[in-house]
Image (tube, rainbow, N blue to C red):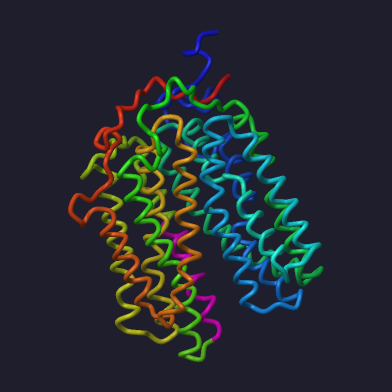
Amino acid sequence: MSQDNDVRTAGADPLPGSGGTDPPPRLLRRPVPALFVATHLGRLPCGMAPLALLLAATADGGDLARGGQLATAYGLAAAVGQPLLGRLADRRGQYGPLVGGSVAAACVLTALALVGTGSWPGLLLAAAAGAASPPLEACLRVLLRATVPPSRLEAAYALDASLQELVYALGPGLVQLTAALLFPQAALLSTALFGLVGAVWLASSWPSRRWRPVPRSAQARGWRYGPLGSPGIRRLLLALLCIGGALGALNVAALAAAVRHDADWLAAALPMTLSGAGIVGGAVYHRRSRPGGKHRRCLPGGENHRRMLWLTGAFAVAWVPLPVLDPAPVAAVALVALPGVCFIPLLTVAYRLVDELAPPGRRTEANTWLVAAFGASVALGHLAGEAGGSYAVPACASAAAVAALGLLPGGGPAAPEASGAPRRRTGGAPRISP
């Protein structure tokens, strides 16, 4: 069988059986629902691990600072490991990074529950568990590109971003329930179990099993640094670093506001409101996505670049009332919903930009860089405590994201052709083998 018939190319028709080029009546038709469920089941550790580590540390006789060190080590190590596993998936296929990473992470978390968290080995184990976290989110987006018709791809990305908020909303609750019913260390075991089941499920799905890496001979030349060779991707990642820092700073600002106003409930209410508003914004954006719309290549001033600038600008402006007014608790909850509504649409367009700017054969790695940048910046955003937990920190971080995207001289994501890399070929990016 010839290569043209043996593989699916980038920009080609959807996977056989997915409805051809005509958009289906519903986005969620086989095999897409299983891909979403498996991915976000496997991503529950992202929302569970920080609190599970905190509870395990306190149960082992440590303090909150020790738990914070473990959670930070886990998050930063994941930011390092994700791009490496993503590059491996682009070169060798998804099965090894997904299954191997999930098995390794599950074993390390189990060892951490047994060994304890009160020593340097505990800190190293937490970092190892984060570094081994499988690149589920990036692999899902590559599979969506192969299974969803192009006219519905942006709606699929919006749904993915909305489901991510559910992961961070449900994760802490599952940890607290497990610890209450069993014992604190059991939360680490359940975290390991969810990650293992979800990753194995995704790796065993037929789109993942049939997905094939791009042959080295068909990959773009001149990308010595992979996706980071694109100035557009570098600026986009810098913007996402600032946006993630704003979200991390909100957690600290919420705690500081709870102390100022003597309202303990505010510490959890502000992040939860932002997440809930994000889900609403994502649902609205999903419904307003044009079924027949065509997405232009991401040139400076192009459609997706304009969308990203507008959404990031709205996200930044929406933060302004909080530091200016320092409102009462109820008003603060209402105001924090404003940036939340912009958040999921913003992420959706960011996914499209990464998808368009990534060189052939490097899309998984490019998406893992997005995940890594965002996750690391959320963790580092907790340093906002050094600024007294002011609302001004997320506001300034959001403004910096706008500057990174295009308001500075020479700003704006550039297409690969503008960065000195060769033009991508539409017929050289194999995807799914029948």
What is the chief secondary structure element of the magenta stretch?
A: helix
Residue 274 painted magenta? yes
Rendered position, 407 above or below 25: below
User: In the orientation shown, which residue stands out farthest toward the left?
Assistant: 409
Of residues 379 and 286, the one drawn nearer to the viewer in this rendering: 379
Of residues 43 and 227, the one drawn nearer to the viewer in this rendering: 227
Residue at 44% x, 65% y is 277
User: In the orientation shown, which residue stands out farthest toward the front?
Assistant: 120
User: Quadrant where the N terminus lies?
Assistant: top right
Position of 423 with respect to 407 (left or right) is right
Rendered position, 318 above or below 352: below
Image quadrant where residue 337 sits:
bottom left
Q: Percent position (x, y) of residue 419? A: 27, 37
Q: Percent position (x, y) of residue 124? A: 67, 60
Residue 392 painted magenta? no
Image quadrant where residue 352 sits:
top left
Q: Percent position (x, y) of residue 295? A: 31, 37
Residue at 51% x, 43% y is 138
Residue at 70% x, 57% y is 191
- Residue numbers of the magenta segment: 264-281
